[in-house]
Image (cartoon, helix red, strand yellow):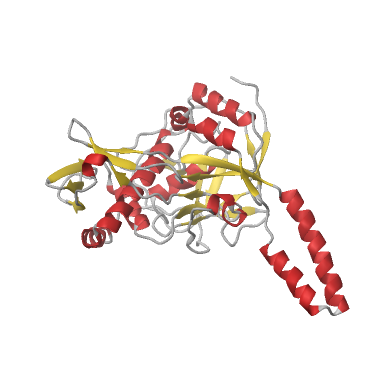
């Protein structure tokens, strides 16, 4: 066990802490959870409060977003924008989707490529919100920086497809997984019960060796925050010799820092100039400086060695919380695949999505909307 430590991690308008890694034991009660508005989720020492959401997360990550403070500092969180590409053998074949409600949950999705149909192991609690998400113009999944975020608490906001879903809960935890490695191996519990999706199993405990390895990498770098993303991570689908449809591509944490102190100094200087120009009645120069102030933002720089360092130990990252990692990976792969189908076979996609809109996946939950900043 490593010596407990604390390393400051600024999270845009926040300061979080990477805590010491210690082993623990959890007791999990499994079952469908129907929640009314209100109440709270517990995750180790943390509590996430349910309440009326401030609004949906309607934000899009584009090609330059990870280098923009306006995105990483004000949305951050989790965002997946990839579009899958077919392997060489499938490049010229038509792809459509089949949903058979008569089959067992977890084997209802079929992918038809040419004359072959490949049944996918994707239960409804994953399938339905991912399909709705892939159909959206917005690709940010979850953020701690809703409009009601203040010095006391985070306002948690979700893409509409993930609000009040188990997958939304998993993606929230994917965003904060590195806040406290010692406790984030757990899953959130409501009134002592952990909500599990079809095919999930209760957490077994902290994977100490993997936690140590991830913590060791994080200790070696200074950074301001991260975004869990799939940008420039190729998502490829192809068939295997065993007759299965295989997907490659995983999410990763993009770490960044900024010249925020230099930005504050520049902002202060420009504001003083604007005040002086306004007092002097120099409207033209005042407007020019005001435009500079409005366009000014910190310069974002990727901490490339840290990003690549955790990419290289993706197996250990998964072991921190397999349920959360697998849910995020399924979201990346199938959202990208569904976008491909939508782009190449719009008619088939529209018919498939109409079916998705009639399904209410279980368990039925209410996702938390507030998290205290007093950690």
For the question of whether residue 136 can be seen, the reply is yes
Indicate left or right for 35 with 306 as reference.
left
Where is the C terminus found, in terms of image quarters? top right
Name the residue located 33 percent from the left edge and 54 percent from the top edge.
339
Q: Which percent across, then down, holds residue 252? A: 48, 39
Which is nearer the eye, 328 or 306? 306
Q: Which percent across, then down, holds residue 129? A: 35, 53
Seen in the picture, residue 112 relative to 356 is either above or below; the reply is: above
Name the residue located 21 percent from the left edge and 48 percent from the top edge.
92
Seen in the picture, residue 212 relative to 201 is either above or below; the reply is: above
Tell me where residue 322 sits by quadrant.
Answer: top left
Q: Which percent across, then down, holds residue 244? A: 21, 36
For the question of whether residue 191 can be seen, the reply is no
Q: How many marks?
A: 0
Q: Which percent across, then down, holds residue 112? A: 17, 48
Tell me where residue 104 sits by quadrant.
Answer: top left
Name the residue located 61 percent from the left edge and 21 percent from the top edge.
2
């Amino acid at each position: 066990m490593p010596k407990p430590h604390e390393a400051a991690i600024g999270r845009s308008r926040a300061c979080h802490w990477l805590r010491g890694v210690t082993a623990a034991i959890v007791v999990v009660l499994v079952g469908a959870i129907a929640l009314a508005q209100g109440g709270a989720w517990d995750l180790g020492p943390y509590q996430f409060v349910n309440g009326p959401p401030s609004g949906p997360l309607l934000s899009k990550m584009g090609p330059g977003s990870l280098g923009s403070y306006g995105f990483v500092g004000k949305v951050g969180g989790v965002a997946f924008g990839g579009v899958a590409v077919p392997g060489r053998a499938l490049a010229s074949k038509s792809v459509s989707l089949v949903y058979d409600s008569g089959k067992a949950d977890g084997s209802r999705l079929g992918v038809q490529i040419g004359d072959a149909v490949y049944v996918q192991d994707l239960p409804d609690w994953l399938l339905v919100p991912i399909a709705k998400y892939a159909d959206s113009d917005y690709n940010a999944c979850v953020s701690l920086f809703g409009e009601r975020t203040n010095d006391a608490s985070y306002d948690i906001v979700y893409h509409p497809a993930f609000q009040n879903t188990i997958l939304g809960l998993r993606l929230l935890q994917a965003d904060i997984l590195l806040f406290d490695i010692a406790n984030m191996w757990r899953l959130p519990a409501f009134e002592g019960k952990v909500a599990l999706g079809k095919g999930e199993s209760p957490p077994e405990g902290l994977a100490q060796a993997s936690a140590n390895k991830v913590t060791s990498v994080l200790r070696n770098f200074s950074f301001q925050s991260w975004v869990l993303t799939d940008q420039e991570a190729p998502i490829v689908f192809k068939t295997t010799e065993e007759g299965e449809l295989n997907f490659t591509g995983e999410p990763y944490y993009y770490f960044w820092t900024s010249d925020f102190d230099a930005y504050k100094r520049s902002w202060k200087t420009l504001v003083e100039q604007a005040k002086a120009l306004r007092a002097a009645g120099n409207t033209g120069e005042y407007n020019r400086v005001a435009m500079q102030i409005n366009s000014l933002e910190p310069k974002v720089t990727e901490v490339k060695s840290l990003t690549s360092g955790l990419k290289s130990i993706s197996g250990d990252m998964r072991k921190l919380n397999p349920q959360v990692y697998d849910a995020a990976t399924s979201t990346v792969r199938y959202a990208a695949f569904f976008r491909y189908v939508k782009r190449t076979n719009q008619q088939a996609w529209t018919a498939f999505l109409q079916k998705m809109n009639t399904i209410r996946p279980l368990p039925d939950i209410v996702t938390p909307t507030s998290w205290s900043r007093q950690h």
